[in-house]
């Protein structure tokens, strides 16, 4: 196993997203990140690399899905709490109004050749997106337009009830609390 550099996501000058590498240097772009932390370019570094790239690209607008099973549990728990008979209301985000993704498509951050592939949840809507960025180029960049929404399917009546319970990550627990305004049951 290689040495994975420690990274910290911060708001830098002018409140712009930045990443501190090994508590020694602050970077504000993907090429700088790759130059200062080449140790992230290994399979074991996929999660911190995805988190760093995501943060540099879109700040806290999206959150990397590290644990697909935990994300699924939180998503389905939120849908189970939503009343399908409640009419749509402006400013109220309900997953039930959108549908469900094919959860089998969602994976933890990983490499496909020279491209990093990860899935991220929109922090406002809770909907999942797929992201792929080629890092073999010295000028790699990413923007919100590079986030591809997953296809969503109609919700079946028993779908949330049929899922096996999985312990939720802290991030997914916070997502569920934010979406429902209540704390999930343990």
Image (spheres, rainbow, N blue to C red):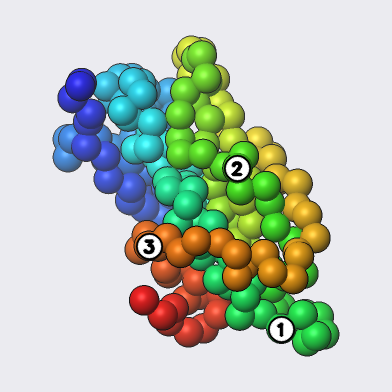
Q: Is mark 2 on a helix, strand or loop?
A: helix
Left/right placement of residue 117 relative to residue 80 reads: left
> Looking at the rendering, in which quadrant would you find the N terminus?
top left
User: SS of the residue at dot 3?
Assistant: loop
Count neighbours of disc 3 (C-alpha within 10 A) and say few if under 14, some if 14 to 19, many if 20 or more. few
Q: How crowded is mark 2: few (under 14 residues within 10 Å), some or many (20 or more)?
A: few
User: Callout 1: helix, strand or loop?
Assistant: loop
Across and down, in percent, residue 100 comes to 70, 57
Question: Residue 70's spot in the image, x, y percent?
Answer: 45, 56
**Quadrant position of residue 106:** top right
In the rendering, at what x and y percent does residue 107 appear? 51, 39
Q: Name the residue under label 1.
A: 83
At a point 75% along the width and 46% down the height, the residue shown is 151
At 74% across and 71% down in the image, what residue appears? 157
Q: Which of marks 1 and 3 is nearer the N terminus?
A: 1
Quadrant including the C terminus: bottom left
Vertical position of residue 20 compared to residue 157: above or below:
above
> Where residue 168 sits in the image (x, y, percent)?
40, 62
Q: In this view, does 88 lie above or below 155?
A: below
Gap in angstroms between the C-alphas marked 1 and 2? 25 Å
> What numbered label is drawn on residue 104?
2
Res 121 seen here: yes
- How crowded pointer 1 is (Cα within 10 Å; few <14, some 14-19, many 20+) is rated as few
- Viewer-closest of 10 and 129: 129
In the image, taking residue 62 as reference, residue 20 lies left or right, namely: left
The residues bearing labels 3 and 2 have C-alpha atoms spaced at a distance of 18 Å
Residue located at (42% from left, 60% from top): 166
| Residues marked 1 and 2 touching at CB (< 8 Å) | no
Residue 167, numbered circle? 3
Q: Earlier in the sequence, mark 3 or mark 2?
A: 2
């Amino acid at each position: 196993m290689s040495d994975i550099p420690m990274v910290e996501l911060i708001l830098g000058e002018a409140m712009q997203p930045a990443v501190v590498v090994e508590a020694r240097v602050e970077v504000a772009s993907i090429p700088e990140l790759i130059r200062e932390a080449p140790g992230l370019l290994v399979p074991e570094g996929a999660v911190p690399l995805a988190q760093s790239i995501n943060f540099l690209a879109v700040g806290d607008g999206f959150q990397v899905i590290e644990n697909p099973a935990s994300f699924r549990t939180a998503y389905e728990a939120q849908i189970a709490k939503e009343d399908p008979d409640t009419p749509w209301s402006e400013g109220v985000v309900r997953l039930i109004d959108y549908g469900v993704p094919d959860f089998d498509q969602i994976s933890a951050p990983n490499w496909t050749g020279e491209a990093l592939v990860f899935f991220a949840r929109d922090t406002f809507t809770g909907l999942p997106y797929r992201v792929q960025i080629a890092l073999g180029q010295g000028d790699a960049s990413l923007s919100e337009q590079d986030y591809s929404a997953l296809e969503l399917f109609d919700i079946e009546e028993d779908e949330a009830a049929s899922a096996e319970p999985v312990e939720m990550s802290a991030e997914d627990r916070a997502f569920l609390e934010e979406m429902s305004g209540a704390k999930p049951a343990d």
